[in-house]
Image: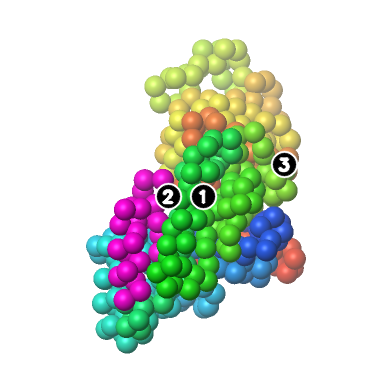
Amino acid sequence: MTSTERVAEIDLDALRHNIRHLRDVAHPARVMAVVKANAYGHGAVPVARAALEAGAAWLGVAHISEGVALRRAGIEAPILTWLHTAGTDFTAGVEHGLDLGISGWELERVVAAARELERPAIVHLKIDTGLGRNGCPPEKWDALLSRAVAHQEEGLIRVVGIFSHLAVADEPARPETDLQVQAFREAVAAAENAGIDVEVRHLANTPATFSRPDCHFDLVRVGLGIYGLSPFSDQDSADLGLRPVMTFSTTVSNCKEVPAGQGVSYGYAYRTQKPTTLGLIPVGYGDGVPRIATGAPVLVGGRMYPVVGRIAMDQLVIDFGTTGIADAPDGPLGKRAVLFGGAGSPAVEDWAAAAQTINYEVVTRISDRVERIYLDPGKGSAGDDADA
């Protein structure tokens, strides 16, 4: 039976809208829906299915284990995975037909898995164009291409893509993106000159999909945008034509009147300035709520109230700013409390600002203790997280 004590409602219609909108923005490039980290906390399997239904051509995950889980759920679309370690099970990646991102050292491990399975591995070569994390250093690119071509001629791999990742695309005025685009074009040209028939070139993330059409190439990799959130500090979701997908809510679990000077939560970091009513909200950092997000808004009964005092593992407190409501028949006790969500709710960005972080982190960190409920009005149904 579905509980409504702590719920992250996932609006799959909103997600499909976002995919269709991003397809229009990126056209004629295709869209890869990035569903790593349990689809940024939204639930990888339901989100992946909805994204593909709305026209996403690819799925992207960080780890091979995430891709294998999607395959085991019956998803057959192309899935790219790009973050590997010495302990990664490359055999599973090849066996399940995942596309494998290669930055250099992994190539021989992937080739060994392909040889063992007698099945060619599907490979995308990654060039570091300036982010300084994963990707092949430019000075080693020609050597990686040479090795890849040799293994492809042996029938052990099939190189289908060249890709990289942008560092500052969320700040469109910065010149470093121009340098990365140029470096990427040079890397693709080198690959083609080496004899690789490049099927998909991909560089753009969500911000570049909106702000840099010259980065679209054949495929754009969109993560944050499919969840209806903006990567820009000066544009919100509505400005970009997106609809937030997750609404995080609970109920007011206790309500009481307190005098002026009442300390609230650990350390008494907050004391009431006047007689007031406090509301207890039964979520905390154990549910993924940022511990430092004091001052963030919570919506109760159509009004926003601030979080006061330190957020604890299981609970936080809001100040209603008035008295005479705790025991009223229509008082706050038991009413829905929305931390963030779509239209009319506090924005994820409000919580990000209070926590001194970014909207990506706020949604991704919502823990498994919070039940996911999938709203799918377009199909006339809603379900819990049983298949997530």
Tell me the residue that label 1 is attached to.
181
Please name whichever residue, 357 or 11, is drawn nearer the observer in this view of the structure: 357
In the picture, measured across the screen, residue 137 lies left or right of residue 339, that is: left
Please name whichever residue, 143 or 358, is drawn nearer the observer in this view of the structure: 143
Residue at 34% x, 59% y is 141
Mark 1 surroundings: few (<14), some (14-19) or many (≥20) residues within 10 A: many
The x, y position of residue 178, in whole percent, is 53, 43
- Separation of marks 2 and 3 at Cα, in angstroms: 30 Å
Q: Earlier in the sequence, mark 1 or mark 2?
A: 2
For the residue marked with disc 3, what is the amino acid? Asp
For the residue marked with disc 1, what is the amino acid? Val
Q: Secondary structure at mark 2?
A: loop
- Separation of marks 1 and 3 at Cα, in angstroms: 26 Å
The x, y position of residue 190, in whole percent, is 42, 62
In the picture, measured across the screen, residue 275 lies left or right of residue 270, that is: right
Residue at 67% x, 63% y is 28
Closest to the camera, between mark 2 and mark 3, is 2
For the residue marked with disc 2, what is the amino acid? Thr
Q: How many marks?
A: 3
Q: Which mark is residue 129?
A: 2
Tell me the residue that label 3 is attached to.
239
Tell me whether the residue at label 2 lies in contact with that at label 3, contact meaning CB atoms closer than 8 angstroms. Answer: no
Closest to the camera, between mark 1 and mark 3, is 1
- Separation of marks 1 and 2 at Cα, in angstroms: 8 Å
Tell me whether the residue at label 1 lies in contact with that at label 2, contact meaning CB atoms closer than 8 angstroms. Answer: yes
Q: Is residue 43 visible?
A: no
Residue range of the region highlighted in magenta in the rendering: 125-150
Farthest bottom residue in view: 118
